[in-house]
Amino acid sequence: MTAAITAHSVVEPSSASKRVAGAIVIVYALVSMIPLFWIFATGWKTPPDSISYPPKLVFAPSLEGYCNLFTTRTRQTPEYILGLGPPQTICDRITRQRDMVIAGPSNYAPRFINSLIIAFGSTFCAVVLGVLAAYGFSRFKVPLKDDLLFFILSTRMMPPIAVAIPIYLMYRQLGLSDTAMGMILLYTAVNVSLAVWLLKGFIDEIPKEYEEAAMIDGYTRLHAFFKVVLPQAATGIAATAIFCLIFAWNEYAFAVLLTSGAAQTAPPFIPTIIGEGGMDWPAVGAGTTLFLIPILVFTVLLRKHLLRGITFGAVRK
Amino acid sequence: MAEIRVENLKKAFGDFVAVKESSFTIPDGSFFCLLGPSGCGKTTTLRMIAGLELPTSGKIFLGGEDVAFKRASERDIAFVFQLFALYPHMNVRRNIGFPLLCQGVPGAEIRKRVEETAKLLRIDHLLDKSVSGLAGGDRQRVALGRAIVRRPLAFLMDEPLGTLDTEFRDLMCEELRQLHNRISATTVYVTHDQLEAMSMADHIAVMNHGVVEQLASPRDIYDRPATVFVASFIGSPAMNLLTVNSRIAKGAKAIDLQGAPIAIPEAREDAPGEKLTLGVRPEHVRFSDSSPFRGEVFGTEYLGTTQIVTVATAQGHLKARLPSQIAVRTGETVGLTLAGERLSLFDAASGRAIRTALYEERPHV
């Protein structure tokens, strides 16, 4: 009896090992999604459910967390509440069940808008500066090019928060504390080194013959840059923008230190949501859930570019 | 269409001189090849003509106007790149029309000229395809289309067939030459492939170490190499170069090789040095039992209709191109005769050809 000889590739993984690898990835993804799921679920719980022990996996969903997130409330006597007439909204009704009335909007919406302005603003600035600098480094003879590039990279060799105190003092002197401009400037400064390095890699891969062809065809270098280089660097720009945005959107330490009012972003605001008798966990869960949406949308919109971006250079085109 | 004249063109990158004081004229409507090994300065010369590099010094006249220090966009030329440089985010039609768009030609006119050009190159069926899906030859045609569509004063091509496989390359060689015959635009073509240059060019400039070693028709370059470098670079296998310790004076009709007189074309000048290099093409070597110039067969390469036989002689190895019917055994001693009227002689010290009757025949232009 001879063993059956089957043709198999030595470079392609076998189907069994593919299945095992797939299973590991799925399990890992599920495990890492537990906190996300927990936050999402907490947003739909009532405050008593959110702190019940043992934790409730099955519960009656409630909008209370979302109502509390967007409103401030005051406690009133039941007689006063009865005298108010019928509730106008679902939130009115939910609030009154707790012997409270809505006093006004909370700061969540303005903080969220601050986050949008600062994160997208700094991402835009970092990518614009990054793409111009990267193009310059990639195409021109810049004196001390390698040293400059190393210097740019060296700004990322320590955690940004290491320079928090000098920046705090500097910002207070310059009047940049608690301003959107100040935060955009700061996040741009942190992100621009990443942007320059990432984009330089992408632009290096675009053959310079394209620009030369465009210049021979009658374009100036600037024109060629916009018409020929930028469209081809779109993948790299998208990937870079996502990385910059994620950093600026999630940044917490500087935001706590440098913003407190007008320019405060959502990350330092969300933990300050305090309900009666402790943290209002459903409101925190709701606030965090909503906070994830912009990044999710942005990443989904650009995911094709992102996937190509992070595997870029692995295989020659 | 225009004549291109290059005067004392020089290009240095720091201490490295890529092109040394070259001067040549490319006649209007001719197909001109810059041929040489990599690093010889041929591409730098072409890029200076195009305006992609600025010369260190010198002049470049394009149709009578000195353009040496003008921007590429201010010179009316078209460039075909080795990697084609087709814009990947545009389809074939927009790629071909791009130069016209840059010049502000109206849309209807662009459409008309793009379609004419595509017909000329037989790619009209591909106009609305993406360039990334095209085969090598078609990409090359699109790149050519982008060059032709603007009707420039001159075409500059930097190894445009370098990335194609052999089969396509032969086809495109033919097509390029036919295209040139049809539109007779002044073309400067850079290549390191002597077969491409020989088969297409009207004139070839052979470059080495930043210097134009010889500028002549393909036939002259082959039959009358001006320097040892040209002799050894052109031809496959290359010209045999034998060192001869013999002086010759003006009027000499033979040199002494191993004590046997070898006929040469009549020398028209005195050789400056003590040593000579005798150049003989493999096809000008014949076997002859009676010849006193002898050697031992070292090896043979069978090539179908011919064979290349390497013979070890006292002057070094000598390759002979012989009909493949002749039976040759390795190790056997053979007599060799050389076709006297086709021999080249070089001064061994300078590598320069010595003027002989062969070189003074009317050149084939």
Image: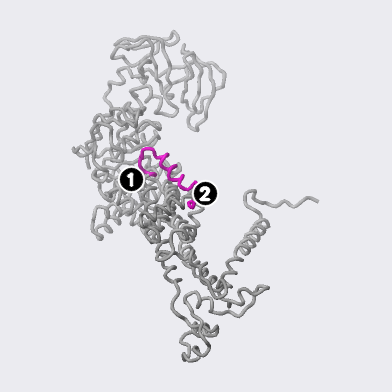
Tag 1's secondary structure? helix
Q: Amino acid at mark 2?
A: Ala
Residue A235 position within the rendered picture, expressed as x and y whole percent measured from the top left: 44, 55
A153 in magenta: yes
Front one among A96 and B38:
A96
Colour mapping used in the image: one colour
Q: Is residue A281 magenta?
A: no
Disc 1 crowd, CA 10 A, few/some/many (<14, 14-19, 20+): many
Q: Which residues are magenta?
A: A137-161
Residue in the image at 25% along x and 35% along y: B26
Is residue A115 visible to the viewer in this orientation of the structure? no
Tell which circle, 1 or 2, labels the residue nearer the N-terminal end: 1
* Residue B178: image location, x then y, percent: 32, 44
Q: Nearer the viewer, residue A1 or A70?
A: A70
Question: Residue at image x 50%, y 78%?
Answer: A67
Would residue B34 be visible to someone looking at this image? yes
In front: mark 1 or mark 2?
2
Q: Where's the N terminus of chain B, which quadrant?
A: top left
Q: Main secondary structure of the magenta part?
A: helix
Q: In the rendering, at what x and y percent does residue B120 appear?
A: 31, 51
For disc 2, the chain is: A
Tag 1: residue type? Glu
Question: Residue A102 at x, y = what percent?
Answer: 47, 81
The answer to whether dots 1 and 2 both sit on one chain is yes
The label number, if any, that marks residue B258 in the structure image: none
Tell me, for residue A314, which label it has, or none: 2
Q: Secondary structure at mark 2?
A: loop
Residue highlighted by disc 1: A212
Instruction: Locate the C terminus of chain B by quadrant.
Output: top left
